[in-house]
């Protein structure tokens, strides 16, 4: 039988994730524009990064949408960011893991938002890189979207979890 700490971790982790999924699926998706605001923030941050790198962006205002969900460099494929790629599930997994793993609340209070902000920033860098890839070699876009950046983003999340376990949690034996 697994020890009580493993069972507690699994119950809290699984329970908090199921609560998040229900909140997201049955309230946030149906009654708010939560995902659209996250996508808008990702597009806006990515545009800022691209412009700071000297990139020329397509003017996509012709779609007259209050919340952005498209980005493209001039003369390149338009990238649409949808809810599956907004990172919200990734942020929830990260928070649920930290909540479930033992550690002082004083560290959880700052580590969870900092981790989510870092993951958000990594996601914006992913969008920036995909926008460049769409401009330079559109044939490489789908592979990098589906595999390269998925592996990269989840690897960074895993490293954040390792940092939590190694440096901030108190695993009781």
Image (cartoon, rainbow, N blue to C red):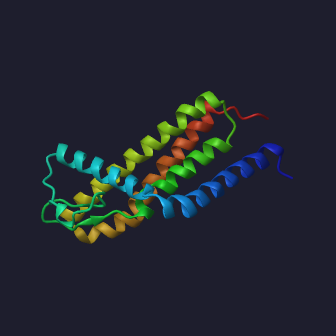
Which residue shows up at 61% across the image and 31% down it? 168
Q: Position of residue 38 (x, y in %)?
A: 40, 52
Q: Give the quarter of the figure containing the C terminus.
A: top right
Which picture quadrant has residue 112? top right
Which of the pair 114/18 is nearer the observer?
18
Which picture quadrant has residue 26? bottom right
Q: Is residue 99 left or right of residue 117?
A: right
Q: Is residue 23 left or right of residue 47?
A: right
Which of the pair 17/136 is nearer the observer?
17
Q: Is residue 82 left or right of residue 18?
A: left
Q: Is residue 46 left or right of residue 10?
A: left
Which residue shows up at 15% across the image and 51% down it? 55
Which of the pair 167/74 is nearer the observer?
74
Q: Position of residue 132 (x, y in %)?
A: 22, 58
Is residue 165 depicted above or below 35 in this figure?
above
Residue at the far bottom: name it: 139
Which of the pair 23/41 is nearer the observer?
23
Is residue 91 depicted above or below 30 in this figure?
above
Residue 167: in sight, yes or no? no
Is residue 141 depicted above or below 173 in this figure?
below
Which residue shows up at 17% across the image and 59% down it? 73
Residue 146: in sight, yes or no? yes
Q: Position of residue 123 (x, y in %)?
A: 38, 51
Residue at the far top: name it: 106
Q: Position of residue 60 (x, y in %)?
A: 18, 62
| Count of all numbered marks drawn on residues in the image | 0
Residue at the far right: name it: 1
């Amino acid at each position: 039988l697994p020890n009580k700490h493993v069972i507690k971790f699994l119950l809290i982790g699984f329970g908090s994730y199921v609560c998040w999924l229900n909140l997201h699926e049955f309230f946030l998706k149906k009654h708010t524009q939560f995902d659209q605001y996250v996508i808008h923030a990702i597009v806006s941050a990515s545009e800022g990064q691209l412009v700071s790198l000297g990139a020329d962006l397509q003017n996509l205002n012709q779609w007259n949408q209050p919340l952005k969900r498209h980005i493209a460099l001039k003369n390149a494929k338009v990238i649409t960011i949808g809810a599956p790629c907004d990172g919200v599930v990734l942020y929830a997994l990260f928070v649920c893991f930290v909540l479930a793993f033992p550690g002082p609340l004083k560290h959880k209070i700052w580590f969870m938002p900092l981790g989510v902000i870092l993951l958000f920033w990594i996601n914006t860098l992913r969008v920036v890189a995909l926008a460049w890839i769409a401009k330079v070699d559109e044939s490489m876009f789908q592979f990098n979207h589906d595999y390269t950046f998925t592996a990269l983003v989840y690897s960074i999340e895993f490293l954040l979890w390792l940092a939590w376990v190694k440096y901030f949690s108190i695993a009781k034996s």
